[in-house]
DNA sequence: TAGATTTAGTTAGCCGACTAATTAAATAAA
DNA sequence: TTTATTTAATTAGTCGGCTAACTAAATCTA
């Protein structure tokens, strides 16, 4: 008995993230799938990045991006162009409809973020951020030790 | 320019969760895959739940559990037994090795949690929890409105 | 310059998650 | 009791993520 769920803060975070992914998904177009918003927003900020650059920024393996970009190219959201100076790298660009989708995604994500913290003061948000960063540091340290 | 990453608190949370999943994975046995810890810990607390019960508690669709339990039954972590009073429901039980794996998982998760909040006071943890709950409420409200 | 090594991306195969459609058992209704 | 409806689980098919093995281009080096 004691206290049934005294812990589980990380578990709660996971629960929130799942809800958030779901909410973003239902807020945007039907031809944009749940894993694609991160790629779209990054391309909106900087078009024409290589798959490796994108994979690093998105914390995803290059193989994952290969497949995702294949699909998004097929549905016409992005297109690949081989770098003329280095034939190994292929750079990814938004199409017209891809750019529109990216703008929509960015707005939806931002609205959700604003709403999620609507009852936070600026100081509270800053405190929350520092807390997250502490957690992040500990998790990073653990990873470094066990690898 | 302005402020490049003034927001992104939710994004940071997602990053932490990904790291956490990875850390749990590398901390436990090799025959336990990343999605299985939640199931194992729930079974450790209460053996013999139906797949529907488990799916609800884990926030996962029943179809997802069907497949996961198939695999875990094959690797000998759990076993299915049909409920004698209602032949539709199949109840899930830990095997001996499954119980051991569940204990290991539980300890690893708890250690990681303790470490993640090692620099938090009790009050800070409580504050953090309330902040998460606020975020959760807003996300839940959004979901209810858009469905 | 020829050959070895590194690097970017792809392919294959697996696990986790979802939806939609299906099966089988239990329950409600006619 | 027979039929209709609900309910638990499964199946099929898709997307997102991973690792391992592979290809092709660029670079290093002997």
Image (cartoon, coloured by chain):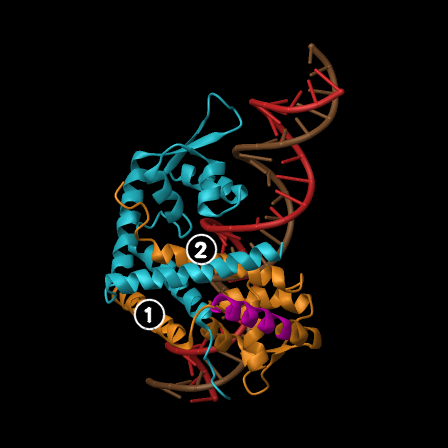
Chain colours: A orange, B cyan, C red, D brown
Q: Is residue A114 magenta?
A: yes
Q: Chain of mark 1?
A: A
Horizontal side, residue A103 vs residue D3: left or right: left
Q: Which quadrant of the structure image shows residue B44?
A: top left
Total marks placed? 2
Give x and y (percent) for residue B3: 47, 85
Graded by Cα atoms within 10 Å as few (under 14), some (14 to 19) or many (20 or more), the crowding at tag 1 reads some
Asked whether residue A62 is in view, the answer is yes
Residue shown at the point (56%, 70%) measured from the top left: A111
Give x and y (percent) for residue A41: 56, 74
Q: Is there CB contact under 8 Å for labels 2 and 1?
A: no
Horizontal side, residue A146 vs residue B69: left or right: left
Q: Secondary structure at mark 1?
A: helix
Reading the image, the residue beneath label 2 is A15
Question: Compared with residue B39, is residue B108 higher up or lower down, i.e. above or below?
Answer: below
Reading the image, the residue beneath label 1 is A131
- Observer-nearest residue: C5 or C24? C24
Q: Chain of mark 2?
A: A
Q: Which residues are magenta?
A: A103-118
- Observer-nearest residue: B2 or A58? B2
Q: Which quadrant of the structure image shows residue D20?
A: bottom left
Give x and y (percent) for residue A38: 53, 70
- Observer-nearest residue: A147 or A101? A101
Check the picture and name the quadrant holding the C terminus of chain B.
Answer: bottom right
Horizontal side, residue C24 vs residue B68: left or right: right
Please identify the dominant SS of the magenta region: helix
Residue shown at the point (70%, 77%) measured from the top left: A96
């Amino acid at each position: 008995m004691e206290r049934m769920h005294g812990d589980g803060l990380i578990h709660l975070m996971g629960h929130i993230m799942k809800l958030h992914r779901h909410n973003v998904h239902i807020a945007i177009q039907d031809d944009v799938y749940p894993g694609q918003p991160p790629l779209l927003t990054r391309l909106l900020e900087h078009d024409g990045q290589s798959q490796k650059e994108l994979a690093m920024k998105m914390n995803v393996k290059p193989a994952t991006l290969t497949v995702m970009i294949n699909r998004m190219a097929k549905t016409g959201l992005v297109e690949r162009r081989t770098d003329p100076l280095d034939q190994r790298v292929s750079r990814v660009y938004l199409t017209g409809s891809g750019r529109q989708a990216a703008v929509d995604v960015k707005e939806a994500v931002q609205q959700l973020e604003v709403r999620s913290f609507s009852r936070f003061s600026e100081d509270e948000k800053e405190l929350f951020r520092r807390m997250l960063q502490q957690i992040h540091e500990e998790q990073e340290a653990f990873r470094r030790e066990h690898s």
